[in-house]
Image (cartoon, rainbow, N blue to C red):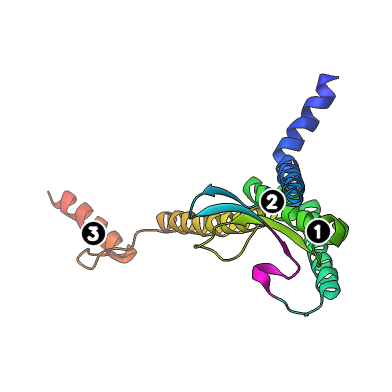
């Protein structure tokens, strides 16, 4: 029994699917807790006075409050299509190139997918009555007021952090690969070094042999 379960568990942890599930669960739970706290009149809550607070808001627009369509329903539909399209693309990519994808990229892609699904759940299932809001959208609750005017949530954190991590990892990998290539390249002779051709080497050997015979 253990011989069958252990390989599956190893694959599960190596796939980082658990990481995506963890972020998705944290996002869903935190949003529902915030909605309940708002409905009970418990918000906003100062976490770090003058810097960080928990404040409930519903974002019916895109990232950074962009209102591209000026229509709640249109924005909702387009967001869901794009988010689910990204998730489907990641799944197809991982299935086709599973063995060739670095573990670090797998972790980042799982985080991005969990963020896309997390915010899509808000758009699809959360109604105006549940949100106690005249509009529907994504529940945002993390507010670095005075520093950053936009509210965000755990799903947003997963997407942004994963994207930054991937960019940094790609840059570091490129630098390491470049340095390896430079080390493997043959060292070019310096200007003050004399380069002896093959013909000159054979000539020198011939002269050495001749000198030895004359002696």
Q: Which mark is residue 99?
A: none
Q: Is residue 173 left or right of residue 33?
A: left
Q: Which residue is mark 2?
A: 111
Looking at the image, tell me whether mark 3 or mark 1 is earlier in sequence order. Answer: 1
Disc 3 crowd rating (10 Å Cα; few below 14, some 14-19, many 20+) is few
Alpha carbon separation for disc pair 2 and 1: 29 Å
Mark 3 — residue?
Answer: 204
Nearest the eye: 174 or 184: 174
Left or right relative to 75: residue 172: left
The residue most toward the front is 41
Q: Quadrant location of the N terminus? A: top right
Give SS at disc 1.
loop
Q: Residues within 10 Å of mark 2 (few under 14, many from 20)?
A: many
- Vertical placement of residue 36 versus 72, above or below: above
Across and down, in percent, residue 135 comes to: 80, 67
Mark nearer the N terminus (3 vs 2): 2
Name the one closer to the observer, 77 or 111.
Answer: 77
Q: Is residue 33 shown above or below 122?
A: above
Q: Report whether residue 127 is seen.
A: no
Visible residue check, residue 42: yes
State the mark number for residue 132: 1
Magenta-colored stretch includes residue 102? no
């Amino acid at each position: 029994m253990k011989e069958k379960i252990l390989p599956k568990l190893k694959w599960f942890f190596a796939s980082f699917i658990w990481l995506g599930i963890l972020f998705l669960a944290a996002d869903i739970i935190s949003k529902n807790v915030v909605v309940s706290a708002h409905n009970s009149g418990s918000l906003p809550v100062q976490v770090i006075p003058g810097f960080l607070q928990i404040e409930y808001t519903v974002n019916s627009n895109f990232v950074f409050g962009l209102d591209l369509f000026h229509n709640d329903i249109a924005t909702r539909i387009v967001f869901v299509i794009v988010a689910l399209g990204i998730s489907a693309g990641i799944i197809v990519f991982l299935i086709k190139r599973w063995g060739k994808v670095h573990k670090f990229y797998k972790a980042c892609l799982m985080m991005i997918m969990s963020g896309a699904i997390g915010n899509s759940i808000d758009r699809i299932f959360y109604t105006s009555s549940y949100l106690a809001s005249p509009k529907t959208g994504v529940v945002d609750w993390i507010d670095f007021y005075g520093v950053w005017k936009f509210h965000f949530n755990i799903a947003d954190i997963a997407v942004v952090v994963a994207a930054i991590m991937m960019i940094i990892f790609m840059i570091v990998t490129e630098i390491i690969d470049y340095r390896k290539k430079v080390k493997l390249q043959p060292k070019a002779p310096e200007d003050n070094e004399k380069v002896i051709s093959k013909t000159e080497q054979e000539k020198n050997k011939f002269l050495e042999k001749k000198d030895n015979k004359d002696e």
